[in-house]
Amino acid sequence: MDLHRDAIVADGHNDLLMLVARRPKDVWSTYFRERWIPQLRDGGIDVQVLPVFIDSEFLPEGALRETLRMIEAAHRIAAANSDEVALCTAPGDIEATTAAGKIALVLALEGCPQIDTDVELLQTLHRLGVRMVSFTHFGRSALGDGSGEDATGGRLTHAGVEAVGLLEELGVLIDVSHVGRAGVEHILELATKPVVASHSSAFALRDHHRNLTDEQLRGIAATGGVVCVNFFAGFLTTEEKPTVDHLADHIVHILDVAGEDHVGLGSDFVAEVFGEKIPACDRPVVIQGLDAELYVPGLEGPGGMPLVTDALVRRGLPEATIRKTLGQNLTRILTTHSNL
């Protein structure tokens, strides 16, 4: 589709770095070039956020070491494939990279097990290129509770409050995806700069704790931030046959509630991650009571991203709104707040 190919397409969350880093370091760059660059190109993706997520096998002692390995992997794949991608860490990097026809890569943290209460290490990780940070995964962290702990009513810890201040000072985006409901409210109370949800959908359409309420959507928009809609089928619908229209429903709802300047895409593609990391004896994969291997057909990976544009066009959305949703909004907040 011409609109998709012409638009800036930005994805707020793809865990591909986990698959790069689990390989021997000597093949990091060639694996990324052969396996992921073609998929990103097929999807028309111009800006890709790469979260650093630490699996339970590395916790707690190996969390920081694995974080550094994943960050090193990101730097190496970018350096070795500089004709195709660039790791963006400095002002103007995203614009220069996309203008040159390359894919802009941005480092993020998904949860902060690697720092525990040593909040000052966020400054170290910023120096290494991290430009977006979420505080938790599903469970409890030293900074606050994840959405899987909503029953506790837990807000941010003292360390979490300190982290908000430091990240805003550094110009690092605070990501509320996975943060529990009370924690999101706490962050929005404290925030003086834009907040992002890198991969979250609408609670009003699917009442799962990983999704955001309308009040939270409005709160993120009030900061000037962006909600990047998650493609994970279990967060979109309870139906056994999810479709791209379920995803479009969430996008349209968030457009209606938060406004067209505050919606983006956060794919959360995990099919290859689960396919490679989870042995057959541990199937089916069930996470938070959901079938984690139920995918929207065609959206198992980044190559299917044009299907999203097709769905939004069929909804009759204005072209300008579609362009904002596909990538202009997320790119704007990355370039203005994270100085990229």
Image: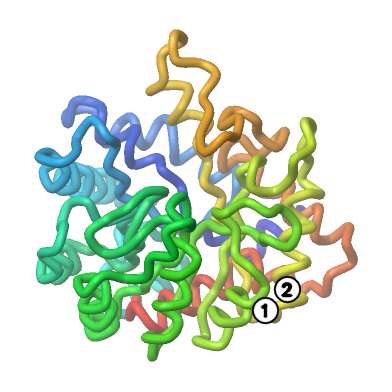
- Residue 297, given in percent of the width and then of the height, sits at 72, 33
Which quadrant of the view contains residue 189? bottom left
The amino acid on which the numbered mark 1 sits, given as a three-letter code, is: Ala
In the foreground, 268 or 291: 291
Determine which residue is flagged by label 1.
Answer: 258
Quadrant (top left, top right, bottom left, bottom right) of the C terminus: bottom left
Q: How many marks?
A: 2
Q: Residue at image x 40%, y 40%?
A: 16
Is the residue under label 2 in contact with that under label 1 (CB below 8 Å)?
A: yes
Q: Amino acid at mark 2?
A: Leu
Residue annotated with mark 2: 255
Element type at marker 2?
helix
Counting from the top left corner in percent of width and height, residue 276 is at 41, 21
Whether residue 48 is visible to the viewer of this picture, yes or no, is no
What residue lies at 57% left-to-right and 63% top-to-bottom?
228
In the depicted structure, whether residue 78 falls above or below residue 221? above
Using residue 284 as the reference point, say whether residue 155 is left or right of it.
Answer: left
Please provide percent x and percent y for residue 168. 29, 83
Q: Toward which corner of the image does residue 25 lie, by quadrant?
A: top left
Residue 262 x/y as whole percent: 61, 77
